[in-house]
Image (spheres, rainbow, N blue to C red):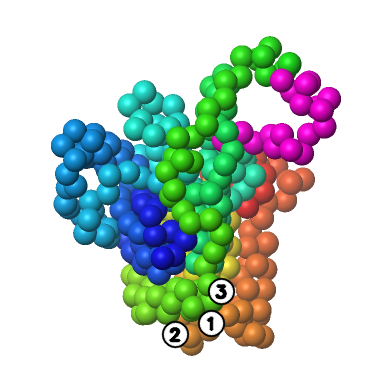
């Protein structure tokens, strides 16, 4: 028996490669059942179906059969944790989290919810926390990170709090960490604010075996799972770079002021790429893609020079694949990143210069907004 034998995890991810990888990783660390959904709307349908199945089993004592995409054959009668991407359509991760925590139709408002995203800036993390997320995992992720966060989430004994628009885990200091005076002050403040506390019912359901963790043999198995999917990642990356080149070529045929759609698509492609490379042993892909994401994240420059920089980033990622530059790429990798960074810096607007209307923006934005 492993720590996660009795657990059922719902994976929600629109990228089929990542969805299959997460499913395989969860199986490798011993999760009893994995159910998969491609977006938030599909996840809601899955959770409703699981709830209906559990109700039917309570009524007749039988267990149903069936399978979800990427899931185990035995249909589950409960969901013990949700592992969801942020950016999806239709229904992104925040919409799914909001439905789970706040909607009257939610079958389990207490289910642990782990959010995955390459958007890991403080503002987005705060938004997820305000919606009641259990944990936030930044992409690119490692299998060990997923295992550790899942173990913590399934073993989480915190109360849930309802106050104002918030319903989710209690994020304040635990009672054992407070002095007697602090506890009295906190109790008084809670009464004034109308705070309500709830004990998650799944704490009593034995979802995980206490302790144990993921041993070295399982970590080796996880690494093998990832390595076996390496060729699939390379094929996916080549196809994704081909999509990027098509968008760049389409933008080049248009006037500068008509390139918004193409630059937005390039930005989303860069977002996909930055969240994948490191997981499969190509952190240079993630680093170059992040630079491309930052370059196209704002509308201050859609010029031909910006398109040239987009091409440079695409060419760099193709070179990384062609030369199989794993890890940091040593001196060649560092030189590559430095050259791309210099090209991006050359495109940065001069804050003391007047805005150029042809660039598509009237002011230079804060580049830390999506860092």
| Element at label 3 | helix
x%, y% of residue 41? 30, 39
| Element at label 2 | helix
Query: Residue 31 occupies which quadrant of the picture?
Result: bottom left
> What residue is pinned by disc 3?
284
Q: Which of marks 3 and 2 precedes in the sequence? A: 3
The residue lying toward the viewer, choosing from 82 and 217, is 217
The residue lying toward the viewer, choosing from 18 and 265, is 18
Asked if residue 300 can be seen in this view, the reply is: no
| Rendered residue at 68%/62% (across/down) | 345
* In the displayed structure image, the side of residue 89 where residue 151 appears, left or right: right
Q: Dot 1, crowdedness within 10 Å: few (<14), some or many (≥20)?
A: some
* Residue closest to the far top: 192
Q: Which of marks 1 and 3 precedes in the sequence? A: 3
The residue lying toward the viewer, choosing from 98 and 336, is 98
| Rendered residue at 40%/38% (across/down) | 96
The residue lying toward the viewer, choosing from 114 and 332, is 114
What separation in Å lies between label 2 and label 1 (alpha carbons)?
A: 11 Å
What separation in Å lies between label 2 and label 3 (alpha carbons)?
A: 13 Å
What separation in Å lies between label 3 and label 1 (alpha carbons)?
A: 7 Å
Asked if residue 202 can be seen in this view, the reply is: yes
x%, y% of residue 106? 36, 30
> What residue is pinned by disc 2?
322
| Element at label 1 | loop
* In the displayed structure image, the side of residue 157 where residue 342 appears, left or right: right
Q: Which residues are magenta?
A: 169-187
Which of the image's four quarters has the N terminus?
bottom left
> What residue is pinned by disc 1?
326
Q: Nearer the viewer, mark 2 or mark 1?
A: 1
């Amino acid at each position: 028996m492993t720590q996660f034998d009795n657990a059922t995890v719902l994976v929600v991810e629109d990228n089929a490669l990542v969805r299959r990888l997460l499913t395989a990783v969860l199986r490798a660390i011993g999760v009893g059942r994995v159910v998969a959904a491609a977006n938030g709307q599909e996840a809601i349908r899955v959770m409703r179906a699981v709830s209906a199945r559990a109700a039917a089993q309570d009524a007749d004592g039988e267990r149903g059969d069936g399978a979800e995409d990427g899931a185990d054959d035995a249909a589950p009668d409960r969901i013990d944790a949700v592992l969801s991407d942020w950016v999806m359509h239709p229904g992104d991760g925040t919409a799914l989290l909001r439905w789970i925590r706040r909607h009257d139709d939610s079958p389990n408002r207490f289910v642990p919810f782990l959010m995955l995203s390459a958007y890991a800036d403080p503002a987005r993390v705060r938004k997820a926390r305000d919606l009641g997320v259990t944990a936030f995992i930044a992409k690119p992720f490692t299998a060990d990170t997923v295992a550790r966060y899942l173990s913590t989430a399934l073993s989480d004994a915190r109360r849930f709090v309802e106050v104002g628009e918030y319903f989710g885990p209690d994020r304040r200091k635990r009672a054992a960490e407070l002095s007697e005076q602090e506890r009295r002050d906190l109790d008084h403040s809670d009464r004034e604010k109308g705070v309500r506390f709830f004990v998650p019912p799944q704490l009593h359901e034995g979802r995980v075996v206490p302790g144990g963790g993921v041993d070295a043999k399982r970590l080796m198995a996880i690494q093998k799972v990832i390595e076996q999917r390496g060729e699939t990642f390379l094929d996916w990356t080549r196809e994704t770079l081909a999509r990027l080149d098509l968008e760049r070529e389409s933008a080049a045929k248009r006037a500068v002021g008509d390139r918004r759609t193409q630059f937005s698509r390039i930005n989303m492609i860069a977002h996909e790429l930055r969240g994948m490379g490191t997981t499969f042993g190509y952190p240079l892909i993630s680093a170059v893609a992040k630079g491309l994401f930052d370059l196209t994240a704002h509308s201050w420059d859609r010029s031909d020079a910006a398109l040239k920089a987009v091409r440079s980033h695409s060419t760099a990622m193709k070179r990384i694949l062609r030369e199989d530059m794993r890890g940091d790429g040593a001196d060649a990798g560092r030189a590559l990143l430095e050259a791309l960074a210099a090209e991006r810096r050359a495109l940065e607007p001069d804050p003391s210069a007047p805005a150029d209307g042809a660039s598509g923006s009237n002011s230079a934005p804060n580049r830390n907004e999506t860092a």
